Image: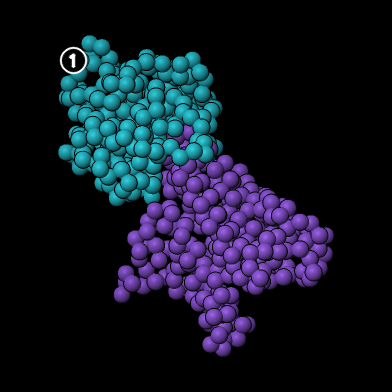
Chain colours: A purple, B cyan
Amino acid sequence: MNFYLTALLLGLAYSCLAYGIYISMRIFNIPDITTDGSFTLGGAVTAVLTTQLVNPGLVLPAAFLLGALAGVTTGWIHTRLKVNALLAGILVTTGLYSINLALMGRSNIPLINTPSFFSLITLSSSEKNNQLIILAVVTISLLLLLRFLLRTDFGLAMRATGNSETMIRALGLNTDQMKIIGLGLANGLTATCGYLITYVQGYADINMGIGIVILGLGAVMIGEMISSTLKWKSITGQLICVVIGSVLFRVILGFTLSIGIDPLYLKLVTAVFVLAVVSLPQLKRTA
Amino acid sequence: MIRIEHLHKTFSVGTANAVVALNDVSLEIPSGQFVVLLGSNGSGKSTLLNCIAGSAIADSGKIEIDKVNLTRLAEHRRSRWISRIFQNPLAGTSPDLTLLENYRLATLRTQRFGFRIGTNAAFRKKVQDEVATLGLQLEDKLDQKMGTFSGGQRQALSLLMAVADKAKVILLDEPTAALDPRTAVLVMELANRLIREHGLTAILITHQLNDALRYGDRVLLMSEGRITQDLQGESRKSLHIKDLIRWFEV
């Protein structure tokens, strides 16, 4: 029971990251590696401000905005300086490593006896249940917010930008600007995930973002497998499936650990698993 | 009115591969005129269209629409005047968005893209009525992804979408090149009808000499970056397919 509860909890927390990846990779078709840096940035800002006893409610917008700034930087480098999107993301993430370390002052900040996002409201006497309820509320609100955004005129234009750039430019929209906004939003969400995870695990670490982009991508791809199996092709269906994908991915990773695989190999398992999910359609076709 | 003065455009300037695409092109197209632009591959037709649309910027010269100079204006800022139909039916629409969503985007060409949901019931009804005029039985498929429609259907919808938001100028770059002959006729008839109904100034690039005779008020021929033939009025009316074939023989 405890095992599945933890998986659900982490899955919900990481769905914020999965939404970030969904926006950059799926809506805008940009492989964005900034994620690794902006996730840690979100965690670093959270830990630093929380140890200064800043209200977690105020830390949230700070984390989001700084993450968004990182994404905007990548977007600007990619669109204005015409640097390949992958390289732009790697450059920003590399730079962010130093910035994060400078912010934190050391490689690890534990949060002990400090306020937490999850202590803002108490809905259940059990700490874990309380976290779970709050995370569920956050995830559902985010889902509804994105569902609204992606169906507005602006959201349609966002979706078409990654889909048919010629059309969008002919319709009078600046696609460069659109991509910058999109990467800003995606990395804002990623940093928000770093914020949530920092409170869930009770510390921030300079290496917490390494390989995190694969976690998000794995969740999005599992979600896509589900949505295409269930034929939930609408935006709402896709957004719900991203959350399901994120939780399922956690369950799978938790299961891997529970059958006794050394945690040392967790990243390897993750990479192989995502590769399997990515290549499955191709293998099916050629078989 | 479109006024083009002494337009020059060279690709790969300063290299051995330099190509002069436009060589001192001057042209005046009155409002509501339907121009057919002919020429062999590499004659500069598409470059001229791209310079007007803004996807290419001329090296020198001037382009005006209704006395507004837009020679150096970014492509997305020209959508106030210009709508485009591309040769590739995939380019003018967004495959992962539904027909209704694509149509919604098209109605916002001259407006801001705000944070409101525009695909409401009233809008759906309006699109349904307009799509029904195509006679392609697409009015019940508004929630189908654009990518699931055939090239001809998408091109017909692109045309409808091009006039959905008060355009003045429509640029058509071989809109039927990727279509089968029957669909091509349907799409050209539709284009002609919409251009006339909305009183649009139109430039059509085509390799179909029959279309050049059947449609439009004026025929232009481009060759090596220059306009070498320009027929309108009586001389356009007496134009025969043999004359056109001869143009391409020299």
| Residue at horizontal 36 percent and vertical 34 percent from the top | B122
The kind of residue on which mark 1 rests is Ser
The percent position of residue B4, horizontal first and vertical second, equals 45, 19
Instruction: Please identify the quarter of the rendering in which residue B180 is found.
Output: top left
The percent position of residue B158, horizontal first and vertical second, equals 33, 36
Under circle 1, the secondary element is loop
From where the camera sits, is residue A190 visible? yes
| Residue at horizontal 49 percent and vertical 44 percent from the top | A155
Looking at this view, is A283 or B113 the one in front?
B113
Looking at this view, is B128 or A4 the one in front?
A4
Q: Could you tell whether B136 is left or right of A248 in the image?
A: left
- In this rendering, is residue A199 above or below B48? below
| Residue at horizontal 21 percent and vertical 39 percent from the top | B136
Residue that label 1 marks: B238
Residue located farthest toward the top when viewing the structure as drawn: B234
Locate the C terminus of chain A and report the quarter of the image it occupies. Answer: bottom left
The percent position of residue B73, horizontal first and vertical second, equals 53, 28
Q: Could you tell whether B233 is left or right of A44 in the image?
A: left
